[in-house]
Image: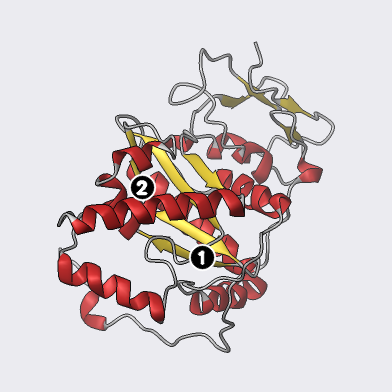
């Protein structure tokens, strides 16, 4: 049974074998007719098709379709001389956005960015990262208000977000008059929280990579984003508020990402460099 809907246009296939060489599941081989074929497999994953679509992507003649996806619908690769300066600019100009305009991002744009996260690296291509999304500004404002009030009640009892004491908590409150208007979420109109089930695959790496890719997608789309950990420490003290997010208890959460249209425009990229002392070359 062809579970992967693997289709080969034998008029296009030249028998080069490139698809066989890039198949991580080892389910492709060259048939007696010199054309690629797929083996039957019991389930997707380690001993079957990894759903990576590398075969579709690598075929020089566009002979392979899989999962109903056709080569002609793929985005073509960008040449290095075009991609490199754009990526350099995105990385140098990305920054944590702590002030946002009071406007919503189009739902279609948000859905498009989240959909593209299926292409982010993840262990074994298990695609197990889930996303808690607040894309409604009014809902976000209600959640912000409820969470802040609960956090203040706890602070009044001497209970502070994990990793904070009274002084550091008061520092955060003072910054509301300057850098961030909202202690918890920087006033972001939208939130995205990537999370993945513990106990299988690589949940920690997968979640962090998905979050990083999302921030770059925001930067490329003219949006501001901020990757927050302070809310995680606060929500650990407020199980009732955390439950409102409906994130399973057995899921790893690495950050809360606030995003939206930035209030402040930056005029140039920063000029950070890596200190040579942070580079270690093993001797063996």
Res. 64 in view: yes
**Which quadrant is home to the C terminus?**
bottom left
Task: Indicate left or right for 103 with 247 as reference.
Answer: right
Q: Measuring 66% from the left and 21% from the top, which residue is drawn there? A: 31
Q: CA distance from mark 2 to mark 1?
A: 20 Å
**Which quadrant is home to the N terminus?**
top right
The answer to which of 62 and 168 lies nearer the viewer is 168
Q: Residue 65's x, y, as percent? A: 74, 32
Q: Measuring 51% from the left and 57% from the top, which residue is drawn there? A: 213
Q: Dot 2: what SS?
A: helix
Q: Residue 123's x, y, as percent? A: 41, 40
The answer to which of 75 and 111 lies nearer the viewer is 111
Q: Residues within 10 Å of mark 2 (few under 14, many from 20)?
A: some
Position of residue 79 relative to residue 160, above or below, is below
The residue indicated by pointer 2 is 205
Task: Indicate left or right for 284 with 270 as reference.
Answer: left
Q: Residue 72's x, y, as percent? A: 81, 44
Position of residue 117 relative to residue 175, above or below, is above
Q: Quadrant of residue 262?
A: bottom right
Q: Measuring 66% from the left and 44% from the top, which residue is drawn there? A: 57
Q: Dot 1: what SS?
A: strand
Q: Which is closer to the viewer, label 2 or label 1?
A: 1
The residue indicated by pointer 1 is 225
Q: Measuring 37% from the left and 56% from the top, which residue is drawn there? A: 148
Position of residue 42 relative to residue 106, above or below, is above
């Amino acid at each position: 049974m062809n579970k992967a809907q693997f289709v080969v246009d034998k008029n296009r296939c030249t028998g080069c074998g490139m698809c066989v060489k890039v198949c991580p599941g080892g389910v492709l081989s060259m048939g007696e007719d010199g054309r690629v074929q797929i083996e039957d497999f019991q389930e997707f994953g380690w001993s079957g098709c990894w759903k990576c679509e590398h075969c579709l992507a690598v075929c020089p003649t566009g002979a392979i379709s899989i999962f109903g996806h056709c080569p002609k619908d793929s985005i073509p690769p960008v040449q290095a001389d075009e991609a490199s300066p754009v990526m350099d600019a995105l990385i140098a100009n990305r920054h944590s956005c702590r002030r946002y305009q009071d406007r919503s991002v189009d739902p279609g744009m948000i859905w498009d960015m989240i959909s593209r996260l299926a292409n982010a690296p993840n262990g074994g291509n298990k695609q197990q990262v889930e996303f808690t999304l607040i894309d409604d500004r009014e809902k976000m404002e209600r959640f912000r208000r409820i969470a802040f009030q609960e956090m203040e009640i706890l602070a009044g009892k001497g209970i502070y977000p994990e990793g904070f004491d009274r002084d550091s908590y008061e520092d955060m409150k003072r910054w509301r008059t300057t850098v961030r208007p909202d202690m918890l979420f920087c006033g972001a109109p939208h939130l995205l929280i990537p999370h993945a089930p513990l106990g299988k695959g690589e949940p920690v790496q997968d979640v962090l990579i998905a979050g990083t890719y999302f921030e770059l997608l925001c930067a490329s789309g003219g949006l501001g984003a901020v990757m927050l950990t302070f809310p995680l420490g606060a929500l650990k003290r407020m199980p009732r508020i955390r439950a409102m997010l409906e994130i399973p208890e057995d899921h790893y959460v690495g950050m809360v990402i606030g995003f939206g249209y930035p209030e402040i425009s930056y005029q140039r990229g920063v000029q950070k460099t890596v200190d040579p002392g942070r580079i270690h070359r093993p001797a063996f």
